[in-house]
Image (cartoon, coloured by chain):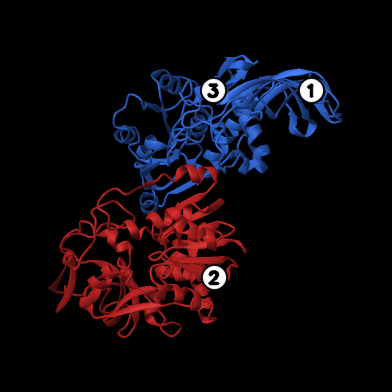
Chain colours: A red, B blue
């Protein structure tokens, strides 16, 4: 049986483009005992994937040239040689970008589409929601009355961070890159205020103006000069969960900036890089909480859904151009 | 009664010099109830004092121009109007740089010179020892078999960090600035190895060679390019207690360097600025442990003692020229 797949054609130098990807028709292997045949429904595109396109040591191994890209995929079981899955089940896993996929039963998990739409398992109940939860709650440790600033605030992780901070009694300021996003953050997601960095000339001042008591927690999704401006407003005993550095993912040279250590030292600030996988043993604590807040309407979630398997590479690249609000997903 | 004091004559631009200080003769005020008259015995000079010479927000308030410098002083009680102290007692406190000092009973504590020399209360049993203890144990959280790198290793904090790491079963590499210091670290203080950064052209490679399993904890006393080289060798889940940035204290421009966040993020690294005062409530836990290790000979301690009240300013400046091994103290 034939299917279409997307492989890494070449490693990008600087900004990734659709030419770094190639579509191929391949013959699927025979199914073995324990395998299932899947049809992909939703393909997740995420900023961290840019790092995997480089040949560099990181938390996820690099993609290999001429090999299929892999990512979070929600799929339907078409045929099963596993005792644990049957045709019609909806499942999730880290899977290759193929229209049809042969997967081992060990690489997928069943999801319950009765309590939430299938795509939510790539978002609020999946990697972005859990990343927001553990970064804010376990590293940031928010206290009522504190001020939280979130960059990449309109992204899949950012909107959840802001709402979780409000649930915990904090003042929340978002940073995003368009007036529509600013409006959405304030009107839809309950941020106390938000800053459009593209139309703001002095970010340091703008943040100081909206954070008269300084910044207690800076949830950093972007890095670069936006982060410099926030960190210059950080309070004594401030905390900086480092979640993403999207501003730097496409840079070809070693990025240079102001040295942070003097400020972190004189203000007793904690900065902690993390990935959600570090907290895997605590997922069972977090998922029911998130699901409950979603049900109660305290936690809203937005998806940018692009249609068609052929659109996956351009959807990924769109993340770096700010084309998404909330979680970017490709529906097939 | 007259005494001599040292005031801040002017704020330094760049490297501090003796011209930033001025000696004055002043009339001491009348003693009130609860006051004691002290004669200074040992005056502590410490790297953090350079920060207080600037007019900048930090963990300690800036010194004021034309006002007396203050620091850790061990002194003898000459006369007492306090019920808690009597003539002949040896005390410690944050006190002005004066030959004779009138101090409130609230600003000093008695020390026991029977169990350790008086000067040790400015070192291994005082601020530097406690800084090493809390930074390494409470932030670094060393585990047996891990690799610990310490910069400023021959300084008052550094030698303690290295020995505490050995007590906790770690491999310890020190970084210092002369062959004599390197020899001392290895032969006297039990470091597994040490690097002279002044004679090493490729620090990154040198550290990699001595840390074949990477760096789990980097105790940073110096900042700047030495730290860049260590941090490029940091392991997944590495920890960086930020204790000092002596390389940058005298810089006039905002220091610039490679951005750290991408590496902290991809390797899930923790960086935590701290001062010993953050851990004040836990001093009673630490001091007996340190005293016990000193008694058992597991924790050695070196002092560089300069003689004469008039030498205090040049002793402080000597810290930034690497003139000390271990704790720098002026004995009067």
Q: Secondary structure at mark 2?
A: loop
Check disc 2 and report the residue beneath it.
A192
Image quadrant assignment for residue B90: top right
- Please state which of residues A232 and B72 is positioned toward the viewer in this rendering: A232
Circle 2 crowding by C-alpha within 10 Å: few under 14, some 14–19, many from 20:
some
Quadrant of the image containing the C terminus of chain B = top right
Q: Determine the residue positioned at 22% across, 78% down.
A: A309
Specify whether A49 is left or right of B119.
left
Q: How many marks?
A: 3
Check disc 3 and report the residue beneath it.
B19
Q: CA distance from mark 2 to mark 1?
A: 56 Å
Spot occupied by residue A177 in the image (x, y as percentages of width and height): 38, 68
Q: CA distance from mark 1 to mark 3?
A: 29 Å
Q: CA distance from mark 3 to mark 2?
A: 51 Å
Mark 3 or mark 2, whichever is nearer to me: 3
Q: Determine the residue positioned at 44% across, 27% down.
A: B191
Q: Determine the residue positioned at 40% across, 37% down.
A: B224
Asked if labels 1 and 2 touch by Cβ distance under 8 angstroms, the answer is: no
Residue B300 visible within the image:
no
Query: With respect to residue B330, does B221 lie above or below?
Result: below
Subunit bearing disc 3: B
Check disc 1 and report the residue beneath it.
B37
């Amino acid at each position: 049986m034939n299917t279409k797949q997307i492989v890494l054609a070449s490693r990008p130098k600087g900004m990734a483009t659709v030419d770094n990807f190639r579509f191929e028709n391949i013959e699927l292997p025979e199914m073995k005992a324990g395998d299932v045949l899947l049809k992909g429904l939703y393909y997740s595109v995420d900023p961290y994937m840019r790092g995997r396109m480089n040949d560099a040591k990181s938390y996820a191994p690099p993609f290999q040239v001429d090999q299929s890209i892999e990512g979070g995929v929600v799929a339907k079981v078409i045929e099963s040689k596993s005792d644990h899955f049957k045709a019609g089940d909806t499942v999730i896993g880290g899977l290759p970008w193929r229209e049809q996929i042969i997967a081992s039963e060990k690489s997928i998990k069943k999801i319950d589409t009765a309590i939430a739409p299938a795509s939510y398992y790539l978002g609020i109940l999946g990697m972005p929601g859990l990343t927001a939860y553990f970064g804010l709650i376990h590293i940031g440790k928010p206290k009522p009355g504190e001020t939280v600033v979130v960059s990449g605030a309109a992204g899949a992780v950012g909107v959840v961070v802001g709402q979780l901070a409000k649930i915990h009694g904090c003042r929340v300021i978002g940073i995003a890159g368009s007036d529509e996003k600013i409006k959405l953050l304030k009107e839809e997601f309950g941020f106390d205020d938000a800053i459009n960095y593209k139309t703001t000339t002095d970010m340091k001042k703008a943040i100081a103006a909206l954070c008269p008591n300084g910044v207690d927690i800076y949830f950093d999704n972007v890095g670069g000069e936006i982060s410099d401006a926030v960190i210059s407003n950080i309070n004594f005993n401030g905390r900086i969960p480092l979640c993403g550095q999207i501003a730097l993912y496409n840079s070809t040279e070693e990025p240079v900036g102001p040295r942070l250590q003097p400020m972190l030292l004189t203000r007793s600030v904690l900065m902690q890089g993390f990935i959600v996988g570090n907290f895997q043993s605590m997922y069972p604590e977090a998922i029911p909480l998130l699901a409950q807040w979603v049900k109660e309407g305290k936690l809203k979630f937005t998806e940018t859904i692009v249609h068609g398997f052929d659109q996956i590479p351009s959807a990924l690249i769109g993340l770096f151009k700010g084309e998404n609000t909330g979680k970017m997903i490709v529906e097939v």
